[in-house]
Image: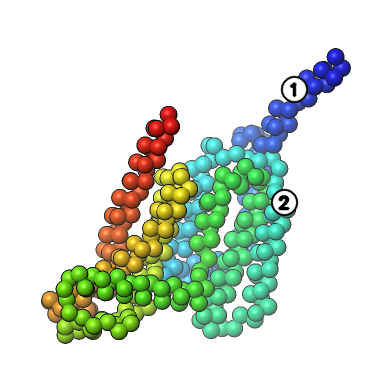
Amino acid sequence: MAFSDHQGEFVKNAPLQAATSSIPAGSAQARNRWRAFLLALAILLLAFCVPLFQLARFAAASQLYSYVLLVPFISAWLVWIKRATLPLSARPMRFAGAIFLALGIAVMAAWLLAGHPGGRMARENGLTLQTLSFVLDVFALVFLFWGKDTVRAVRFPLFFLLFMVPLPPSLVLATDSFLQYGSAQVARLFFGLSGMAFLQDGLTFQLPDISLHIAPECSGIHSTIVLFITSLLAAYLLLRTTWKRALFVLFVIPLGLIRNGFRVFVIGELCVHIGPQMINSPIHRKGGPIFFVLSLIPLFLLLIALQKSERARSGTKK
């Protein structure tokens, strides 16, 4: 009987122990934890106010990184829409938080020890390292104040903050090159299908009465990155299956090449059939948004198809 009573006491206490692993959303403990977290975040923002201000100025003046200004607000919104169901873990993951904090300090130390000379490329690398250090420190705060369930619930908004980090110039050059040559191959296919006479030499197309060259600024890297970010958000919010999310996001790569190759083809056709002056027309200089919107159509159709397949699968299981 003594063993039975002890076992009963253990069973009664088990739910209580499980309950203490999370904090009730409206409790004083939850409010205090949120206050402490927001205070720590405010201190972190104050510590990084100079590089963050430099990042904002850089992004506002950059054609490539204009999206950076929206990233923290999108992350905050993604957490906000989960606020009603967000689990508040009582046991912070302090070891993981310490690792991210150490990584953030190490990245900042690497920038400081490098001497950060004043060239444009060096400044961009410095901004990359400083912003990465800030994002890693935000990761650290989340782990230091919240536990496993909370981190799991906000992992996408948290890692979405990495889009704040400007790409290293070397990676931008490599991406530009990939998009240039990929777009050239797609444009070659379109020109071939149209029956137009042309000669191709790498990134240059010799058409009747005009020569077209796919320059780095014509690679479409900005619209491709924005399309990639858009697909990530749509996959996270509207799809449930991991492999379908991955398929939807990866579809952006060939879609970006097709969009840019088609743009080259359209400009070439206009120059041949209307006149070489079309190379300076708005369709070339400011036509990027038009082709970006056009690329959203197949992306949207794929999203609808994937959603229908998920609904059909869930209906079959029922």
Identify which residue is drawn at 70% across, 46% down. Answer: 92
205 horizontally vs 232: left or right:
left
Question: Where does label 2 land, which residue?
Answer: 94
Q: What is the secondary structure assignment of the residue under circle 1?
A: helix
186 horizontally vs 107: left or right:
left
Above or below, 278 against 142 in this view is below
The amino acid marked with disc number 1 is Lys
* Picture quadrant of residue 254: bottom left
Question: Where does label 1 land, which residue?
Answer: 12
Identify which residue is drawn at 61% across, 44% down. Answer: 150
Above or below, 234 against 83 in this view is below
Percent position of residue 306, x then y: 37, 46
* Picture quadrant of residue 296: bottom left
Furthest-right residue in view?
A: 2
Percent position of residue 30, x then y: 65, 39
Q: How many marks?
A: 2
User: Can residue 150 be seen in the rendering of this structure?
Assistant: yes
Towards the viewer: 190 or 75? 190
Above or below, 179 against 158 in this view is below
Task: Check the picture and name the quadrant holding the N terminus.
Answer: top right
Furthest-top residue in view?
A: 1
Front position among marks 2 and 1: 1
99 horizontally vs 83: left or right:
right
Give the mark nearest the N terminus, 2 or 1: 1
Percent position of residue 277, x then y: 17, 81
The colour scheme applied to this rendered structure is rainbow
Above or below, 100 against 83 in this view is below
